[in-house]
Image (spheres, rainbow, N blue to C red):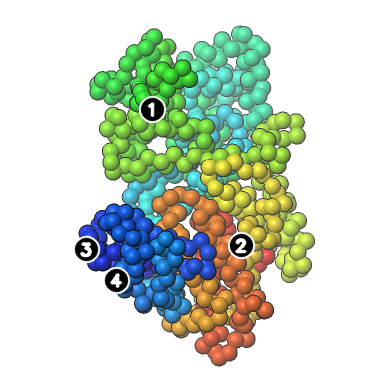
Amino acid sequence: MQSTIDLINRRVRDAVASAFDLDPATVDPLVRRSQDDRFGDYQSNCAMGLAKRIGQKPRDVAEKIRAALVIDDLCETVEIAGPGFLNLRLKPGYVAMELATIENADAPHDRVGTLPTSEPVCVAVDLSSPNLAKELHVGHIRSTVIGDCVARVLEFAGHDVHRINHVGDWGTQFGMLLAYLRRTQPDVLIDPVKLHLPDLEKFYVEAKSFYDSDENFAKTSRETVIELQRQDPQVMAVWRAFCNESLRHCHEAYDRMDVRLEDRGESYYREMLPDVVRMFEEKSLAVESNGAICVFPNRDRFKTRDGDPLPMIIRKSDGGYNYDTTDLAAIYHRIEKLGAKRLVYVVGMPQKQHFDMLFAAAGLIGWAGEDVSLEHLAFGSMLGPDGRPFKTRDGGTIKLRDLLNEAVDRARKVVTESEKSNDLDAAMVEEIAEAVGIGAIKYFDLSHALNSDYRFDWDHMLAMEGNTAPYLMYAYARIRSIGRKANVDYDSLDTFAPIVLEHGSEIKLGKVLLRFAETVDMVARDLKPNILTDYLFDLSKAFSTFYDRRNGVRVIDAEPESLKLSRLRLCDLTARTLRIGLGLLGIRTVEKM
Ligand code: ARG
């Protein structure tokens, strides 16, 4: 099924082309969803631009478009407003028919009216990507959660997605860690499986304080880096054991958060680094400066504080490589070896310049042509409740593990305090607490615009009312329980039964349901998860009005039977859209709450 907005876009484009004798390919119909229901469901803003282009009055242009528009089957009479907006309101009959065909469409049951893309591409999403020296902490949540959501949406849209965990597992700090490991756990040299790091964070802190206070140890550390870079087998064995152990910690949290990742850390590219430098040199794109090799991706755009052109140092004067070189190798690998046409980097705002320069360099050397899209999905910071960097009481970092535990504990309280918790057994309470607690953290994060900072707020994210995971999860569970109470098996409802949209609340719900397809398209294009959270919140609100005794309609006791069936189908569609939509956010639904 084609999304409604696409359909309207096409109709308006054709109308403009025929009214003004233009090539349809040159027409942008500029159809948007209306901000306010009172002005209709969609609006086209193209008359104003067109008026300029052809030198006529905007309202006249709008008038002519309206006259040429063939859209009776979809919309009520088109209205012209303001300087020349075309306001479009969907006909309930159209909405009903489209909804009724959702099930009958070729698309499988679990797509609720969305179609996979006809142009699948290979996408590389770079997400989470912690430095392995430390344990996952609150600072890793955003990249992990946003990246996972984006990957899920792109997968759902039918693309071939690589979820790359570009972990920091190579570089100078590993000399220190390995040297400390050799000192404290010499057994590891003989048998790497013996490695035991129950608390990575503590290990890092201890190693660092040794490094800072003991000159001998610092010297050994530096020597160990060199051994590592030479790939001395013994040091490599310790390094590997360390990385495995550290990744095991990470994956405990990833598993708990339902996040699937391909670990491909910086070390993966270590052998390619000299080639990267050579490729830039061969194209005369690298210059030497004080013994270091530099690339200037754009001298006018990237400048130092003093206004001098800013280089990317791709080989240091001591012969070592750095973060930039590794990212160049990785971008080359993703484009040339994986065949990625879209590269998405889910990394915080502070690295904006790094990615701007990286993308410019990849363009300069010709790896990223017109057909490759490079996107830095930069996000703001997650702040503590006081609006300052999120820390423990004594100023330490908050481990992700501890935060997840606290979320689940708090969710358990919310669940057991609700009066509906009586018919839940202990195992169910645990399942719900886990889903709600982790869902709440994810949802709260995803519902904020990417580029803004936000304050962590337990009470807000766990509230049963408002734009929160518990509210949406509860809406889902409620619909499921309506089915149980009415002895209805949603899965065996007659999918050929017509959908009837009569009552205002029913029409509204129908329209929101129909919007799911275009919402998913939009998120897959713009990669803004909060478009999806806003949509799901709208859907839950529309459902709650529809089901409300006073403002909505009767469902279980609706008559005649055909109306009851139509309304049950709306319930079922809502539940499935919620389940799939929350699933795209990485949030599990539960049948009871
Ligand atoms: N490990 C880096 C950090 O903690 C993030 C890596 C992001 N991905 C990348 N390809 N540079 O800051």
Task: From the viewer's perspective, tell me whether residue 239 is left or right of residue 344.
Answer: right
Label 4–label 3 contact, CB within 8 A: no
Res. 435 image quadrant: bottom right
Label 4–label 2 contact, CB within 8 A: no
Q: Which mark is residue 21?
A: 3
Residue drawn at 75 percent across, 64 percent down: 418
Label 3–label 1 contact, CB within 8 A: no
Give the residue number, with chain letter if any, for mark 2: 472
Res. 287 image quadrant: top left
Respond yes or no on whether mark 3 lies under 8 Å from ligand 1. no
Q: Which of 561 and 508 is in front in this view?
A: 508
Q: Which mark is residue 301?
A: 1
Residue 584, given in percent of the width and then of the height, sits at 50, 56
Q: Which amino acid does label 1 sit on?
A: Arg
Q: Cα distance, mark 4 to mark 3? A: 11 Å
Q: In the figure, 41 relative to 367: above or below?
A: below
Give the residue number, with chain letter if any, for mark 4: 68
Q: Nearer the viewer, residue 447 or 423?
A: 447
Q: What residue type is labelled 2?
A: Leu
Question: Quadrant of the image for the C terminus?
Answer: bottom right
Res. 285 image quadrant: top left
Q: Cα distance, mark 4 to mark 1? A: 47 Å
